[in-house]
Image (cartoon, helix red, strand yellow):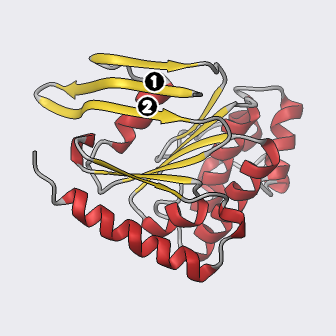
Amino acid sequence: MLIKAEGVSKSFGNNQVIQNLYLSVTEGEFLSVLGSSGCGKTTLLRLLAGILKPDSGRIATNRSRIGFVFQDDRLIPWKNVLYNVSLVSSEERAKKMLKRVELADALYKYPGELSGGMAKRVNLARALSYNPEILFLDEPFSSLDVVTREKMMELIASLWKEVNLTIIMVTHDPLEAAELSTRVVVSSKGFKRLQEFELGDPGGRTFEENARISKKLLDSLRKVSDFVQ
């Protein structure tokens, strides 16, 4: 296993966000964690990435290089795009990744000059410039319009194939999970109840198949969201 969480719990003050979680991640998979807003998805992602430490339990990983795309843009507003991306890599590598996300002509723009979709791609390029073995995505398509979201989804899907990444994404959208994932974990609040779906390679699925999977995931999300321990 690439990552293994055993009996993990995390609280902030009196608010227990994650309770006794067991979860494994296999190398090369695209795992989506699907849950409603406020269920603890972002906390889980930060625990798995090592940004947060669990209060109890254990998280083991055999990889050291990670990339993390936060839900909110983490760009330095008074520095240009190239500077923001080359913070974690060489300038040459930064330019290569910016070209890959179709921003080669935006190297010297500033964050305030970027659209929402462009800013998301800059954050993605920065995460990839570190040459990560695991890429963590926190609601990467939030606040994007439909057309931009589809383009971003296509980009991430192609990068996953090209670079042979392991990707862990959290989302509240069943269709995003259906279209991109090899496996989906649907969670209740606090991760007290989980339901897993093995989906296989997303590349061979039709639109109709993804729509059926999305419906199944939505039904599961409703069930686990109604769960009260």
Mark 1, Cα crowd under 10 Å, few <14 / some 14-19 / many 20+, is few
- Element assignment for label 1: loop
Q: As rendered, which of 49 and 81 lies closer to the eye?
A: 49
- Give the residue at x 34% y 54%: 35
Q: Amino acid at mark 1?
A: Ile
Q: Is residue 208 above or below residue 43?
A: below
- Give the residue at x 85% y 33%: 93
Q: Is residue 80 visible?
A: no
Q: Amino acid at mark 2?
A: Arg
What label sits on residue 51 in the rendered view?
1
Q: Is residue 130 above or below residue 192?
A: above
What label sits on residue 46 in the rendered view?
2
- Give the residue at x 37% y 23%: 6
- Give the residue at x 26% y 26%: 10
Image coordinates for residue 109, horizontal then vertical, percent: 73, 50
Q: Quadrant of the C terminus?
A: top left
Image coordinates for residue 48, horizontal then vertical, percent: 46, 29
Image coordinates for residue 46, horizontal then vertical, percent: 43, 31
Q: Is residue 41 visible?
A: yes
Q: How many marks?
A: 2
Evaluate if marks 1 and 2 touch, with contact meaning CB atoms under 8 Å apart.
yes
Q: As rendered, which of 5 and 40 lies closer to the eye?
A: 5
What label sits on residue 19 in the rendered view?
none
